[in-house]
């Protein structure tokens, strides 16, 4: 056991593995300096385009990546600066009342029915007005035609004279 300890500690454990103390690294067989100018330009351009594309892709990915599953509201400036500058509480409460009233009114199931009824009444009034104006224009045409023909007793002016 002591011999094992001595051999392990003496060579930093390399005696068991039987590896040489020097590491052989592979040598490059191509040098950038030995390339012709056109290949240097092509490799440089390809490297710049690749690095730029990778940077752009990373930037776009970071801009659309959601860090949370919750949506945070934007930070708007708050005009309230302390006890000496306050907001108009009367108008704020009126707006809150108006919003609540509208939401209550819009949330009712008969909202669509009221809307349809309002449109129906409006169309009925328009149709009645159109019929009335049509009758009045026909009566006016008949009266002018009768007056042009000179038929006695048919126009209002002649009735008043008689």
Image (cartoon, rainbow, N blue to C red):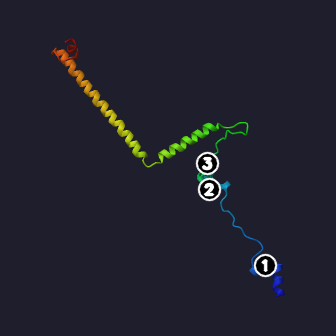
In the image shown, does 129 or 48 lie closer to the viewer? 129
Q: Which structural element holds mark 1?
A: loop
**Discs 1/2, front:** 2
- Residue position for label 2: 68
Mark 1 / mark 2, whichever is N-terminal = 1
Q: Of the two numbered discs 1 and 3 on the same chain, state the one appearing first in sequence.
A: 1
Numbered disc total: 3
Please state which of residues 136 and 13 is positioned toward the viewer in this rendering.
Answer: 136
Residue 150, given in percent of the width and then of the height, sits at 16, 14
> What is the secondary structure assignment of the residue under circle 2?
loop
Note whether 79 is above or below 142 in the view shown.
below
- Disc 3: which residue: 73
Say whether marks 3 and 2 touch (CB < 8 Å): no
Residue at label 1?
13
76 or 8: which is nearer to us?
76
Q: Which of the two labelled residues, at mark 3 and mark 2, occupies the earlier sequence position?
A: 2
The relative height of residue 61 versus residue 147 in the rendered view (above or below) is below
């Amino acid at each position: 056991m002591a011999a094992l300890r001595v051999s392990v500690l003496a060579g930093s454990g390399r005696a068991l593995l039987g590896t040489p103390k020097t590491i052989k690294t592979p040598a490059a067989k191509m040098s950038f300096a030995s390339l012709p100018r056109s290949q240097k330009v092509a490799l440089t351009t390809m490297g710049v385009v690749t690095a730029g594309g990778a940077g752009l892709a990373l930037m776009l990915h970071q801009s659309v990546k959601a860090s949370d599953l919750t949506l945070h509201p934007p930070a708007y400036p708050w005009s309230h600066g302390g006890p000496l500058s306050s907001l108009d509480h009367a108008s704020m409460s009126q707006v809150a009342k108006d919003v609540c009233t509208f939401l209550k009114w819009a949330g009712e199931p008969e909202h669509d029915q009221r809307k349809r009824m309002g449109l129906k009444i409006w169309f009925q009034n328009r149709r009645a007005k159109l019929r009335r104006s049509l009758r009045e224009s026909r009566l006016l045409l008949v009266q002018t035609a009768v007056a042009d023909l000179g038929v006695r007793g048919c126009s209002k002016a002649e009735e008043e004279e008689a």
